[in-house]
Amino acid sequence: MHILIVEDETGLATELMHFLAQEHYVCDWASNGREASEKVAVNRYDFILLDLGLPDYDGLDLLKEIKSTDYDPAIIILTARGALEDRIKGLGLGADDYLPKPFSLLELQARMQAVLRRKFKLQSSSVMFHGFEMDSSSRRVMHGHHEIVLTKKEFDILHYLLLHKNRILTRLQLTEHIWGNILEDDYDSNYIDVHIKNLRKKLSTYASTDWLETVRGVGYRIAI
């Protein structure tokens, strides 16, 4: 996933980015509200970790700004502000969860996974589709007893399309998800097309891939 970390404590932000990168997430960091506002305006993030105690912005105002965008990222509030009123306000404004500082990185990861399961109506880390099984925890794709060996980017593209099944994702959306921030001038690169072609080739060895649809001039969709 493409994640924005909004955190003014450099040490904590660095620790979060290092940990999440090891878990195969693409991370951006904003150290203040102004920078976060600019990043939210030009990127479609999958997940935002939001500190309420920013030096130049009320975190709750930034939360309102995020929720007014035309996309719906998952949001966990990370803050030392322990007042019950702040928690209630944050959740009432649309945050998905609230984690007070200090916190365990493993607990954060567990909460992020729980939020994603709720958001995408997943019962577990394993998803069945058209005779295939994808496990996001072990990062394996199986067809029966056969494992299909995918590259990291092939797995990430397939996983992202599955999370948004029956919805058209543009090449720009897929590129931002896999590589993070890019210049819009690069949106028509053929990187995504090459990875989709390789995915189809590997998966079609075991079953039809007609469900992985190309929407001409727009992008791709997995039909379930």
Image (tube, rainbow, N blue to C red):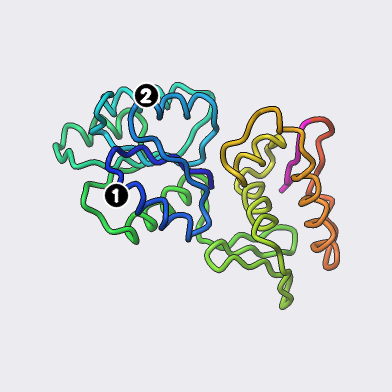
Q: Residue 34 has which mark?
A: 2
Q: Position of residue 71 (x, y in %)?
A: 53, 29
- Give the answer, above or below, for where 99 lies relative to 21: above
Q: Position of residue 161 (x, y in %)?
A: 66, 47
Magenta stretch bounds: 218-224
> Disc 2 versus disc 1: distance between alpha carbons?
20 Å
Helix, strand or loop at label 1? It is helix
Q: Is residue 189 left or right of residue 55?
A: right
* Mark 2 surroundings: few (<14), some (14-19) or many (≥20) residues within 10 A: some
- Give the answer, above or below, for where 193 lies relative to 71: below
Q: Position of residue 127 (x, y in %)?
A: 61, 59
Q: Pick the residue in front: 197 or 124.
A: 197
Looking at the image, which residue is at 20% across and 33% down? Answer: 86
Helix, strand or loop at label 2? It is helix
Q: Nearer the viewer, mark 2 or mark 1?
A: 1
Residue 220 inside the magenta-drawn segment: yes
- Looking at this view, name the residue that lies furthest to the front: 10
Q: Is residue 105 left or right of residue 212?
A: left
Q: Is residue 137 left or right of residue 98?
A: right
Looking at the image, which residue is at 76% across and 36% down? Answer: 219
Q: Position of residue 207 (x, y in %)?
A: 83, 63
- Give the answer, above or below, for where 3 lies relative to 21: above
- Looking at this view, name the residue that lies furthest to the left: 83
The three-letter amino acid code for the residue at tag 2 is Arg
Looking at the image, which residue is at 39% across and 39% down? Answer: 75
First in sequence: mark 2 or mark 1?
A: 1
Looking at the image, which residue is at 31% across and 22% down? Answer: 61
Q: Are marks 2 and 1 in contact (CB under 8 Å)?
A: no
Q: Residue 124 has which mark?
A: none
Q: Residue 11 has which mark?
A: 1
